[in-house]
Amino acid sequence: MQAAFFHGVRDIRVREVSDAEPQRGEVLLDVTAVGICGSDLHTYLLGNIGGVSSADPIVLGHEASGVIIALGADAPSTLRVGQRVAIDPATPCLACEFCQHGQHHLCTNLQFMGYFPQHGALQQRMVHPARSVVPVPEGISDVGAAMLEPLGVALHAARLGAVRHGEDVLVIGCGTIGLLCVRLARLAGARRVIAVDRYAWRLDMAANFGADHCLNIAQDDPVQAVLRLTNKRGVDVAFEAAWVTDTANQCALAACNGGRVIIVGIPAEDEFTLQASVVRRKELTIIYSRRMNHTYEASIALAARGLIDLDALGQFQMPLARAAQAFESAAEYHSGVLRAMVLPQMKG
């Protein structure tokens, strides 16, 4: 079978590898769809993510779906061959302090696929812990099933932000996670949702997902525009989803007194700055959101009921043989590319 390996900055190579067999507690999957996440792009462009890197080539990809083709011993009875599943990239230990308190995303022994040194899903077949695959209904496509992972990330952030009916919400950065935050804020009953980005096609999708105001930073200062739209009050909740250095501080400047700032993006420089006097005087709550936690059930319900159109975000699709092109298209913000999807079973 084939797999796409990351060898170094802007260096993705597809090559043949041996098939694996599922061991006890594992399943073997045909991988059907893989989304290229912003953290994958960090690795692709910088050679590391959060300072973590590897000297050996690694298969990236942690947003994925598949079909079960074999079951190892002791696999749950709820799973069967031929079943379509979303692949949860995280396998917590279930034994540490944080797992015992239900905070599986904070597990101190967490195994996470596509993160050094564990190989990810950019391969035609893969083994994965059986307890970390989630059956999906037929109404959710393979692309939609892979997109349940970023929806879970956005849903975890939305829960931290706790948007209430009638509140004003700002989302800076309208990549996939930001767009999903826009949609979730709309569904939560926000009065006004303000979306900010630099690319017109992303802002068009933000409007489709429910944003009331779409601001292009090439034309508007986002902070001044928010203050103008809110009669100088500011927004109740600001989501930072742009992974650039100054956007967290823009969220703080645009928030109202007592507002909440939820940081979802990962800064390329691995640091960001907040104006302390602003945060203090406003008594802002600053929360950093990490991955997701217990979100698959709710994410599946949202997608299955048609409340969030995940397929609309994954229209740019490439076969595994062209994985390098998919990475480059996403990294260079080619027009119309919201989430670059690699389909390992696609011919080409």
Image (spheres, rainbow, N blue to C red):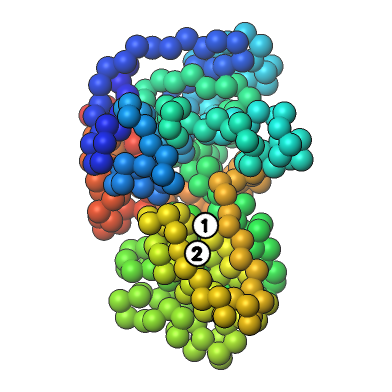
In this rendering, the answer to whether 87 lies above or below 74 is: below
In x, y percent, where is residue 98? 71, 39
Name the quarter where the N terminus is drawn: top left
Q: Residue at (56%, 86%) from the top-left corner?
A: 230
Task: Bin the neighbour count of mark 1 within 10 Å (Cα to Cα): few under 14, some 14-19, many 20 and up.
Answer: many
What is the quadrant of residue 318 in the picture?
top left
Q: CA distance from mark 2 to mark 1?
A: 6 Å
Residue 87 percent across, percent down from the top left:
53, 31
Q: Nearer the viewer, residue 206 or 99?
A: 99
Amino acid on which the number 1 mark rests in the picture:
Val
Q: Describe residue 19's horizontal placement relative to residue 13 as left or right.
A: right
User: To which quarter of the image does residue 83 belong?
Assistant: top right
Residue drawn 30% across the image and 20% down it: 2
Q: Position of residue 143 (x, y in %)?
A: 44, 39
The image quadrant where one finds the C terminus is top left
What SS does tag 1 mark? Answer: loop
Where on the picture, by quarter, is residue 181?
bottom right
The image's mark for residue 9 is none
Is residue 331 visible to us here?
A: yes
On the image, numbered disc 2 is attached to which residue? 240
Q: Tell me whether the residue at label 2 lies in contact with that at label 1, contact meaning CB atoms closer than 8 angstroms.
A: yes
Q: Amino acid at mark 2?
A: Glu
The label shown at residue 264 is 1
Residue at the location (40% across, 49% down)?
38
Toward the viewer: 71 or 115? 115
**SS class, disc 2:** strand
Q: Is residue 221 above or below residue 337?
A: below
The answer to whether residue 206 is seen in the rendering is no
Residue at x-position 59% and y-position 87%: 233
Judged from this view, the residue extending furthest toward the right is: 101
Which x, y percent locates residue 58?
35, 28
Name the N-terminal-most of marks 2 and 1.
Answer: 2
